[in-house]
Amino acid sequence: MSCLQTVAQADRLFPYSRWNSQLPALAKQYKQGNPVPHVLLRDFLEPEVGSAVAEEFPAHNTDAWTQYKHHNENKLGMAKRELFPSGLGEVTDELNSP
């Protein structure tokens, strides 16, 4: 796969070109966040990518999930990357990349 194909694939999953053009304004917004520095990225993912990932998201009653239950928490987690559906896995990998 060429570098251009890799960039195009990454941009399909996460709109780098859109967000990169806004970095100076976002950095300023982050620094001015109250009561703590923060920024809200509306439409963080392209709507069609978000919808596709939501549609394939595994049901909570499958064996893929690990339940963490304690007096302070009751949550499910999926730590085994190989159990992620393909689209969710691609987005997760991209968001965890440099």
Image (tube, grey):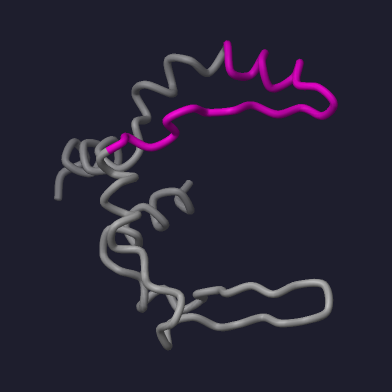
The front one of 7 and 13 is: 13
> Residue placed at 25% from the left, 40% from the top?
48
> Residue placed at 82% from the left, 29% from the top?
36
The front one of 13 and 97 is: 13
> Residue placed at 58% from the left, 74% from the top?
76
Indicate the position of residue 75 as horizontal and vertical percent values: 64, 72
Query: In screen coordinates, is 72 left or right of 3?
Result: right
The front one of 33 and 57 is: 57
Query: In screen coordinates, is 36 left or right of 84?
Result: right
Majority secondary structure of the magenta segment?
loop
Indicate the position of residue 84 as horizontal and vertical percent values: 36, 71
Q: Is residue 5 above or below residue 53?
A: above
Q: Which residues are magenta?
A: 25-47
Q: Is residue 57 above or below residue 43?
A: below
Indicate the position of residue 83 as horizontal and vertical percent values: 36, 78
> Residue placed at 69% from the left, 22% from the top?
30
Query: In screen coordinates, is 40 left or right of 72?
Result: left
